[in-house]
Amino acid sequence: MRTNVLLKRGAGGILAASLILTGFGTVPAVFASDEAETGSTQREWSSDTLTVALTTSSFVTDYENNYFTKYLEDKLGFKLNLYMLPTDAADTRTKIALMATGGDSEDSPDVIVVDGHLTNEMIYQYGSQGYFLALDDYLSDPDVMPNYNAIPEDDKAVMTTAQTQADGHQYSLSAYEPETWNLTPYRMFINQNWLDALGLEVPTTTDELKEVLQAFHDNDPNGNGVQDEIGVYGYSAGGYGENTTAALMNSFVFWNGGGTNGGLSLSDDGTQVIAPFTTDGWKEGLKYMHDLYTAGLLSANIFTDDSTQFKAILNQDTNIVGLVTAGSLSNWTDAKNNANFLEMSLIEPLTGPEGVCYTPYNDYTPTQELMIVAGTDKLDMALAFADEFYDHDTSLIERFGEEGVDWTRDPKVLAENTNQWVEEGVYDGLSLVVLSAVWSTNQSQTWRNHGPRYASLEQGNTTYDLSNGTKFDPDDPTQLQVKNYNWYNGKHPENILPALKYTMEETEECQDALTNIPDYVKRALAEFVTGARDIDKEWDAYLSELDNMGLSVWLKDAQAAYDRSLQ
């Protein structure tokens, strides 16, 4: 009752497929039911067991006797046969490739849950080749997927866009828990103690920043009698807001930091895919940072340090950092009580000479979590299993564990607690209080968010973690969520390029450019800023090299993918 997929190597190493579809017959009734004597509706399932291949979490100690496993079985009325996939993403991908090609015949799941480990290209490949079931008709039917269809339309539209592949079909179900903190991780922190010591105001423009940094450099603001102050610091290899040069570039042109879509963006009117790293604004940003570098105000270590070195600099006994960007406050050891962090103040993104004032930003993209194997003879159970994850309570249990033990909605407990969003008047009160550290400890209460799910922005912002027994402290200097939202969340162009979905032909055509150009751009940025390459004399050669690397072809394919996303 399965799809045999015979794969062979095509041109350029892309997998082509010849499909032999066998044993499908008539699709089973999705939900068959009879009225029991009690008057309640009981479903008649096509079997008593559903086989689920599930990516293992190293934090989960027991899946068979897991609270969430038992909860699902009791709620759905059938057993789950869990086949554990590897924890490592690459190993999971290899395992699923074997399943899809029939090379792992002993493992025949009905449903696959992957914790976001499959790329869109893989999901598209296995879906278009017939291994993953196209879910479009089921997702649009509230009788089949009632919980999914109860998601607010705006959020469901985001999920639909993320789930839709290049051929227009949805082969996966996603996890979507919108939030704001992680959307803008390039938060700028300036040394407020140094500003105060020198009688300076917080800079709001790039020109003002240069003046402040020069004063930091010349006037020994840390008071140790040594010219050891670093004006601008960060590290370019950081993956969560630590590349300060990306933050500074956004005062000249919008650039998402090189992550999603390799750093491509949209024209102001939202019609054309562009490469911001070829623009005049990019060139001016390079010149500004080169000026800081030649004046000794921007550290070359930004381009060579790693995470360990970055944290060591931030946590020296004497603070030597004037300006830095960081997504996580954990870069400062015990930030709430860290003397160096307590010297720093979050500031707003800086305005450049042409009035540009952005911060690197990527829309929150739902992760693809669950696929149904096309040949399953338990489609009714597979769809019910998938839809159950979007039940509000089930989503909470999957994330936080058992209600009343690991978390609570008890009105009395909610009233006794608060968080920054409530304190700032954004929300009237909390909706949930976390009681135990399920997320950060070894446990058998949840699957640790492995699976599709949905939680609204309000749900996330009205949750308070009481697991360490500490009440909210309004004077806690690390409570920056609301300030971050007010200062950073809107500092991006009106039109943001969504994560692009390429066809297999487009992927083959632009793969080298997509892989190599982002690294080349970051390397060239470092060379221009430090003077290893002359900006004016070698700018045209830089553009020519990008073209030789296939930029024009990549932009063509990216435009085609973007145009499809608008249909």
Image (cartoon, helix red, strand yellow):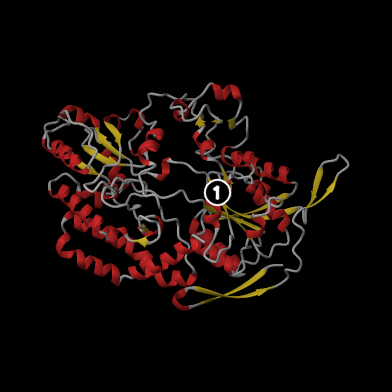
Q: Residue 137 location, x and y as percent?
A: 66, 59
The type of residue carrying mark 1 is Ala
User: How would you rate the neighbour count of disc 1 (Cα within 10 Å): few for under 14, some for 14-19, many for 20 or more?
Assistant: many
| Residue at x-position 32% and y-position 64% | 517
Q: Residue 236 location, x and y as percent?
A: 29, 51
| Viewer-closest of 283 and 37 | 283
| Total residue callouts | 1
Q: Residue 377 location, x and y as percent?
A: 73, 62
Q: Is residue 402 left or right of residue 548?
A: right
Quadrant of the image containing the N terminus: bottom right
Tell me the residue that label 1 is attached to: 175
| Residue at x-position 76% and y-position 53% | 31
Image height of 215 relative to 174, above or below: above
- Outermost bottom residue: 11
Q: Is residue 449 left or right of residue 67?
A: left
| Viewer-closest of 71 and 231 | 231
Question: Can residue 228 be seen in this snapshot?
Answer: no
Image height of 254 relative to 225, above or below: below
| Residue at x-position 63% and y-position 46% | 389
- Which structural element holds mark 1? strand
- Outermost front residue: 269
| Viewer-closest of 105 and 162 | 162
